[in-house]
Amino acid sequence: MNKNVNNFKANYKKLPPEFNIFLVLLGLALLFEILGWIFIGQSFVANKRRLIIMILQVSVIGIIAVGVTQVIIMAGIDLSGGSLVALSAIVAASLAQNSSYTKAVYPHLTDLPFIIPVLAGIACGLFAGFLSGNIIARTGIPPFIATLGMLVSARGASTWYNNGMPVSFLNDDFIALGQGAWPVVIFLSVAALFHILMRYTKYGKHTYAIGSNEEAARVAGINITRHKIIVYSIAGGLAGLAGVVTAARAMSAQAGMGMMYELDAIAAAVIGGTSLFGGRGRIAGTLFGVLILGVITSGFVFLRIDAYYQEMVKGAIIVGAVVVDQIRYKKKNTKDKDI
Amino acid sequence: MNEIDKKIILKTEGLSKHYGGVKALDNADFTLKNGEHIAIVGDNGAGKSTFIRQITGVEIPTSGKIFFDGNLVNFKTPSDAKNAGIEAVYQNLALADDLDVPSNIFLGQEETYFNLGPFSFLNAKKMYDKSIEVLSKTGIKIPDINIAMSNMSGGQRQCVAISRSAGFASKLIIMDEPTAALGVQETEQVENIIKNLKDRGIPLIMISHNLRQVFDLVDKIWVFRQGKIVGSVDATTTNSNEVVSLITGIQQKVGEEASFI
């Protein structure tokens, strides 16, 4: 009997750490499936259209979450994601307008090849991240404050940029980026790329090391300042990319876009097993975290429950995920003391 | 530098560190010969750790000169000191608890397949094999080196920290209280690693509060008191009475059996 338990434990340990989160995802889907048959009389999962809409909706959050996950693994936090989505969406859109529209933001810069607005949007986020990274790494102020400042400033900048007016009449080849499966493809490629970088490169190793023990990383000779700037820049750049996709999907951009996205992105990372204490977490976990958020949103819509309840449940789930992490962390610490 | 000076691996002249008005380290003149093992002893707040922090580049001295391996050096960061060949094992072990053993041993000097700056791909197999190799020299048993450090015992952690320093081609190893948190058996293992370093001719500076250990392991004892170096004595000719009176600053009789301060 005891041997069987040990056997199970050994096999369980061999499973990737994302297995638990995957079970939660399955459990939630099953819950909505059962509730669906009881109250609505139809299946939740067996609806291709619903699944497509669900994954499309979370792709933008997912792109931001990939960056935020890296920041949190480094024991930092990035609150600026949502505002950077708005800023880079509006900057990208202003360079993607077509010449048939007479009141373009830049009348001389219409009908540009789609790569220019895309790069401009990413660069915009990258620069904002670079700025936050420099402030955090060089002045030593808490990342919470620095990125909170960026959250407010970037929202202001995106309103200022076109006097609060929306930017529309975008080129077809730019808009194409937000249509069909493109947002999902972009999200999955970004997630795959950074999953590999975090697991198999020096960049990833140093990110985990700084999050685990910054002092140890410093005396080991890692350039902490430079590394922090790189990680915050990448997070900013990914928020910029999310902004580009948002503008392309909506076929226009306005200053109110991406509101609260940063919190959804942080939630996805935390639900996906990334520790707010730093040092632990994986991009693959965040992928499941994003899907869990998607299932909750789409499940509530499916059950025709008010959006308010949805927000309340989401909040509870975020707090719950952090509580679980805290308990795990404490357990580990007391174990250290026993030795 | 003349011939005699080349035998000196580390030398400081008038090394001082002031924190505001507090003179944590005051005018320290220190020399260490190549291959020599020395201990730094002293009461709490005597300036031992401050001294170490200056020569490992963790802090920048207020004034004074450091000569290492025949050159005047000016370490700005720990990596400067590391690149020069000074490896340190810190009191708090300085391990990344969430990382596995090879990652910790190679932290900051990872093996990669080809250089792409920060995005270089890690050669995990090479790091694993080399880790096994350096750990085998310490004689400590770690069943699985691919699990996180936080799952390991104090002795295992200490051995990983020391292996990290001893494993690389270092010219000087510094240990800040290497056995402070260890049990009897683990202390013995760490002492064996230190003896092994002596055989390999690698010089060592060790901070320790354990006089029994100090007399067992080192050639020379340097005594710090209130930020100043108050003496250096040969471990073979001195006794614990003399060392203790230097540490406390007063001549007093101490029982022969007193091995802990």
Image (tube, coloured by chain):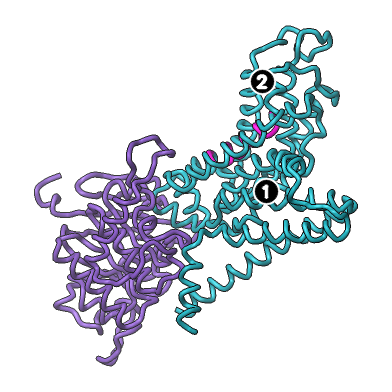
Chain colours: A cyan, B purple
Three-letter code for the amino acid on which mark 2 is drawn:
Pro
Characterize the magenta stretch by its predominant secondary structure. Answer: helix
Residue at mark 2: A117
Tell me if A335 is positioned left or right of B68 in this view.
right
Lower sequence index among marks 1 and 2: 2
Secondary element at tag 1: helix
- In depth, the one of B37 and B14 nearer the eye is B37
Q: Is residue A303 magenta?
A: no
| In the displayed structure image, the side of residue B59 where residue B187 appears, left or right | left
Neighbor class of circle 2 (other Cα within 10 Å; few <14, some 14-19, many 20+) is many
- x%, y% of residue B203? 20, 61
Q: Is residue A259 left or right of residue B127?
A: right
Nearer to us: label 1 or label 2: 1
Q: Is residue A231 magenta?
A: yes
Q: Residue at x 27, y 91 (%)?
A: B257
The chain carrying label 2 is A
Whether residue A194 is visible here, answered yes or no, is yes
Comparing B67 with A76, the one in front is: A76
As shown in the figure, which amino acid type bears the numbered disc 1?
Val
Which residue: 73% across, 44% down?
A51
